[in-house]
Amino acid sequence: MISTTVAAVVTRFAPSPTGQLHAGHAFSAIRAHDFARERGGRFLLRIEDIDPGRSRAVFVKGIEDDLRWLGLGWDGEVVHQSARFEAYRGALGALGSAGLLYPCFCTRADIAQAASAPHGPEGLFYPGTCRALDPAVRERRMESEPHAWRIAMDKAVEQTGRLHWHDEETGEVTADPLRFGDVVLARKDAPASYHLAVTVDDAWQRVTDVVRGADLFEATHIHRLLQALLGLPTPRYHHHPLLTDAGGERLAKRRGSESLANLRENGADPAALAEALRRGEMPAL
Ligand code: GLU
């Protein structure tokens, strides 16, 4: 008899604690939570706090309170990315050894001013200023100047060849990371960027299904590339449409963007809210 083992489903909710959660976050958390629960799987909570300037402990507590209030229990310990820097350094080291990274000293203003800077899917497309630095100058500047690490995207793509991923909403997608240019993989103030940390952690936590908003669809082009370069598995992706109000508009300022903390304090019924969100509706509160 042939027996096959199907990996149990693992999903995660991975907010950045840089503000309070609102209904759009709740909608996404419910989608990830229910996807796992309906399949007897695990639902994880990961706090994406690599940004030292913007992350706050008070928002971490708020996220946990909001999820509990909505009845969304998570499995195991909460993972904090701020405690995972060694893992990101390891991944960065591997990419560096493969000759795919270079240090970048540019400020945002430098990049914005570069005459040829066009726009990529994530904003300004890096014009490659620091890639062309003389090696001796680079060495010297590295000793005294803060620097980020960028990936030499064309070299990386050459190494991986053509890549695909499966998205439950859109089907088979061909990765096109070249459109993003030489993105930052480690920031000046943290040994990782969102792209690197999320890719490393989804693999480390054995996430089988990434359920998240369609606003992060584009980022997956880069995550798929990093998976290939780092020898990590590719999860299935489910980029759900963003929550809209009854008229089909993205959440209006007054209603949808009201924080869950406010709703909680004002006595809103969490069961009614969660039920409406499960129907894809923004309830009148
Ligand atoms: N931390 C990201 C955010 O809050 C989401 C990460 C992800 O789901 O991949 O937008």
Image (cartoon, rainbow, N blue to C red):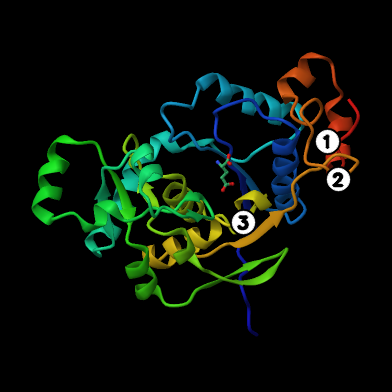
- Going from N to C along the chain, the mark reached first, 2 or 3, is 3
Marks 1/2: CA–CA distance: 19 Å
> In front: mark 1 or mark 3?
3
Marks 2/3: CA–CA distance: 20 Å
- Residue 93 can be seen, yes or no: no
> What kind of residue is marked 1?
Ala
Residue 273 at x, y = what percent? 85, 32
State the SS at label 3.
loop
> In front: mark 1 or mark 2?
2
> What kind of residue is marked 3?
Phe
User: Mark 2 and mark 1 in contact (Cβ < 8 Å)?
Assistant: no
Residue 115 vs residue 211, the one in the foreground: 115
State the SS at label 1.
helix
Compared across the picture, whether 80 is left or right of 266 comes to left
Quadrant into which the C terminus falls: top right
Compared across the picture, whether 191 is left or right of 242 comes to left
**Beta carbon of the mark 2 residue lies under 8 A of ligand 1:** no
Residue at the spot of label 2: 248
Residue 82 at x, y = what percent? 41, 34
Residue 79 at x, y = what percent? 50, 38
Residue 274: which numbered mark, if any?
A: 1
Q: Eyeballing the image, is 13 above or below 60? A: below
Q: Residue at x 57, y 62 (%)?
A: 235
Quadrant into which the N terminus falls: bottom right
- Assess disc 2: are there few (<14), some (14-19) or many (≥20) residues with their C-alpha within 10 Å of its C-alpha: few
Residue 17 at x, y = what percent? 55, 29
Q: Residue at x 19, y 36 (%)?
A: 145
Residue at the spot of label 3: 217
> What kind of residue is marked 2?
Gly
